[in-house]
Structures are given as C-alpha cells and as structure tokens.
Image: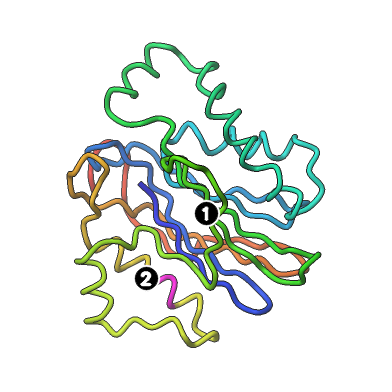
Amino acid sequence: MTAINAIVRRDRIHLMTDGAVYNPEGQVTGITQKVHILAHLSTVVAYRGPTWFGGGFATLLNSANLVDFDDLLSQVIPLTHAYLQNGLNGLPADAVAEAGIRLDLKRVEVILAGWSHRRGRGELYELNTERPEWQLEPKGVGVIMPGNNPELIARLEAHGWCPEDEAQDVPNLLALLQHQRAVPDILPNGMRARTVGAFAQHTMITPGGIVTRIVERWDDLPGGAR
C-alpha cells in the first residue's frame, strides 16, 4: 500500500510518494522511502506491492550494466520476471510462507519515470505483474495511485483540486497526497484502510539530473494504524 503520484511536464517529471509500510490489515509496520534513484540511467523506480520487492529490485537494475533510460525500458520486463522468480529464495522460508497466506508476494505495480535523452523528453511507464500479459504501459501526462476510489474522487472534486498550473506542481501533488491520506483506500483483500503515511517525498527528474527531498512528515509509528 503506497501512494505514487506523478506529473510529466515538458522539461521535468515530478513524483510525490509516501513513506509508510503497511500490513494487509492497514497497520503501520515500518517506514521507508518508496522511490529508488538510478542517477546514471536518469531513472526513478517506484512500486506498489510487498516490501521485499523494492530495494533488491533497484539493486538488480543498478547492477544490470544498463546504460540509459531507454536501455532500461528494453530490459525491465525480463529483469522483473527473473527477480520475481528468484528474489524470494534468499528470504527465510517460514516468513515467506506466512506472508504468502495474507497477500500475493508477486503482485507488484512498478512505476518507471525517467528522461529519454534519445527522444529528448521525460516519460512515465507502469508495469503491472498482475496482468496476464506484461507490458510497459505509457502513462502520458501523469499518474494517481491510488486513484480508483470514489471517495477520493469526490473529495478532490469537492476541494477543487486541479493540476493544470505548472508553477504549483509541488503544492498540488502534496495536497493530493494529503487527500489520499485522509480517505480509506480499498485494499486487495476488500478491507478499507488508510494507506498513506510517515512522510511526503518529492522527487524531480530533469535532463540534468534527479533531486529528492522530504517535504512533510507525519506522526505515523510502526505498531499500529495512525
């Protein structure tokens, strides 16, 4: 359970993510960043899914001898498949078995945001491992995750949330994260729980590089819901 929000502009990409780790019941169990920067590839990787996936997957991509964002796009599907097949092998078998009862450990939504120097633009893609046929889905001008939530949509409309003003991208993305934090998300098991917490992290990709910072912190603590 993670929030990943992004806006693609002509000369940059903005991402806003949270930092809380939740169990399937919606309780805070840890705090961690959800974005992984591959500066030499002009790429940021973010994901929604089980905690075990993120750091190891970023390490795999970092060591795969890729040269740029476009090279990553051409290789990420087989690399993801291999990691999901083998990545759990190094974890304690009992812990994997217990966790596997409660959630699908191979269900992951990967977001790739990067700068294509070949095409001279920022691009955003999603890879969803739950779909029968894996493919990189271009996300165009941006993404809101979680976004398929009637209560969230109604709240955004009621507050007049609008992302059109480029000068307000960071405040708008932070406001979006706060709205997502305020309403329960619909979990894969059908339960409803708040799934945005700990901190708000803004990451920006430009042709010249990647910067990231924490723009707001919340008092979510491991061991219980906020």
In the displayed structure, 103 sits above or below 12; it is above
| Nearest to the observer: residue 48 or residue 133 | 133
The image shows residue 149 at horizontal and vertical percentages of 25, 62
Report the front residue among 76 and 155: 76
Kindly identify which residue carries mark 2: 176
Which mark identifies residue 18?
Answer: none
Chief secondary structure of the magenta span?
helix
Q: Which residue is mark 1?
A: 126
At a point 26% along the width and 71% down the height, the residue shown is: 153
Q: Amino acid at mark 2?
A: Leu
Q: Nearer the viewer, mark 2 or mark 1?
A: 1
Q: Position of residue 206 (x, y in %)?
A: 70, 69
Please give left or right for residue 74 compared with residue 204 in the image: right
Precedes in sequence: disc 2 or disc 1: 1
Local secondary structure at mark 1: strand
For label 2, the SS is helix
Amino acid type indicated by mark 1? Glu
Q: Are marks 2 and 1 in contact (CB under 8 Å)?
A: no
